[in-house]
């Protein structure tokens, strides 16, 4: 867990890196601010100043890594040292899948990953709702999830996303404790057939875990639920964002038709062989 002083230093470093490189890093601040977080973070200082950071984010058997080094001290081995420490931890912890995250627009990130022999896995588009005329909200379509809905949420992740059941169970239980997060169950004739998670942070709202059971897809249920959530958030003055894999053409088409536009990309890589 990062102290408040460390959080402030990481945020300042992120601001400097993003301004210099013209990118947006995915540091998962919702995770970094958690007081019960057990994943380690790796920090590097020079003359008392934070110059490097690498965050480790475990999601069941999968772990994601994302980090940065101040532009003034690059190409001196600082990030390599952070990376080696984090990879050693991930392998000893027994994660079965390690994903390295770098903004699509980051030339420095791509260069480092090539040096490591990393293999491209996939790209996620980060999308922002740009405004569109939406139909009137359906008041009977959504309800807040309760602890009794966890099993349905697990089955949705397994059936709609192909998530490992143990990982899905772990993630959904954790979401019950996530601050600023509300999960809604999507209803059809009174039965929960889908879900969508809203995470609020100030004037921003992010949508995650949007899924409908395959046997109920193609009926417009998910679309109406998405439109209802977006309309509610927009009415509250929120900027609405979501993430979607670039290769998920069906989801991209849906989001675009509702008024979302791609604003940036995040690339994911598998680490290269251990030297």
Image (tube, rainbow, N blue to C red):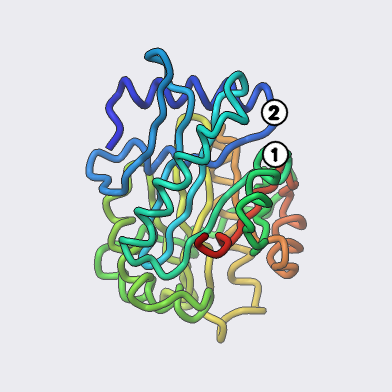
Give the residue drawn at x 37%, y 78%. 165
Viewer-proximal residue among 122 and 75:
75
Q: Quadrant of the N terminus?
A: top left
Asked if labels 1 and 2 touch by Cβ distance under 8 angstroms, the answer is yes
Foreground residue among 70 and 183: 70
Q: Tell me the CA gap for discs 2 and 1.
A: 7 Å
According to the picture, the residue beneath numbered tag 2 turns out to be: 21
Which is more N-terminal, label 1 or label 2?
A: 2
- Residue that extends furthest to the front in the rendered view of this protein: 275
- Image spot of residue 66 (x, y percent): 51, 44
Q: Report helix, strand or loop for mark 2.
A: helix
In the figure, is residue 209 to the left or right of 48?
right
Q: Describe residue 243's horizontal placement relative to residue 132 as left or right.
A: left
Q: Which residue is mark 1?
A: 106
Determine the residue positioned at 51% across, 56% down.
Answer: 208
Q: Is residue 230 left or right of residue 198?
A: right
Q: Is residue 93 visible?
A: yes
Around disc 1, counting alpha carbons within 10 Å, would you say few (fewer than 14), some (14 to 19), or many (20 or more)? some
The image quadrant of residue 269 is bottom right
The image shows residue 51 at horizontal and vertical percentages of: 48, 23
Rendered view: 103 above or below 73: below
């Amino acid at each position: 867990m990062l102290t408040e002083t460390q959080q402030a230093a990481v945020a300042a470093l992120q601001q400097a890196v993003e301004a210099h490189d013209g990118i947006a890093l995915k540091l998962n601040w919702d995770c970094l601010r958690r007081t019960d977080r057990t994943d380690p973070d790796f920090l590097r200082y020079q003359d008392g100043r934070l110059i490097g950071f690498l965050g480790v984010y475990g999601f069941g058997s999968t772990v994601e890594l994302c980090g940065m080094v101040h532009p003034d001290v690059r190409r001196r081995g600082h990030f390599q040292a952070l990376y080696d420490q984090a990879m050693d931890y991930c392998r000893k912890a027994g994660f079965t899948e390690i994903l390295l995250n770098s903004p699509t627009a980051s030339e420095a990130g791509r260069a480092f990953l090539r040096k490591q022999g990393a293999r491209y896995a996939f790209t996620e588009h980060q999308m922002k709702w740009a405004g569109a005329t939406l139909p009137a909200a359906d008041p009977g379509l959504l309800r807040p999830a309760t602890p009794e809905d966890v099993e349905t949420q697990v089955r949705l992740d397994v059936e709609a996303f192909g998530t490992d059941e143990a990982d899905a169970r772990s993630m959904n239980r954790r979401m019950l404790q996530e601050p600023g997060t509300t999960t809604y169950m999507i209803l059809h004739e009174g039965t929960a057939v889908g879900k969508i998670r809203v995470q609020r942070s100030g004037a921003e709202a992010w949508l995650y875990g949007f899924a409908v059971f395959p046997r109920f897809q193609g009926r417009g249920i998910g679309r109406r639920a998405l439109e209802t959530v977006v309309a509610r958030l927009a009415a509250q003055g929120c900027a609405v964002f979501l993430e979607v894999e670039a290769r998920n053409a069906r989801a991209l088409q849906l989001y675009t038709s509702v008024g979302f536009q791609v604003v940036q990309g995040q690339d994911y890589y598998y680490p290269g062989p251990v030297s």
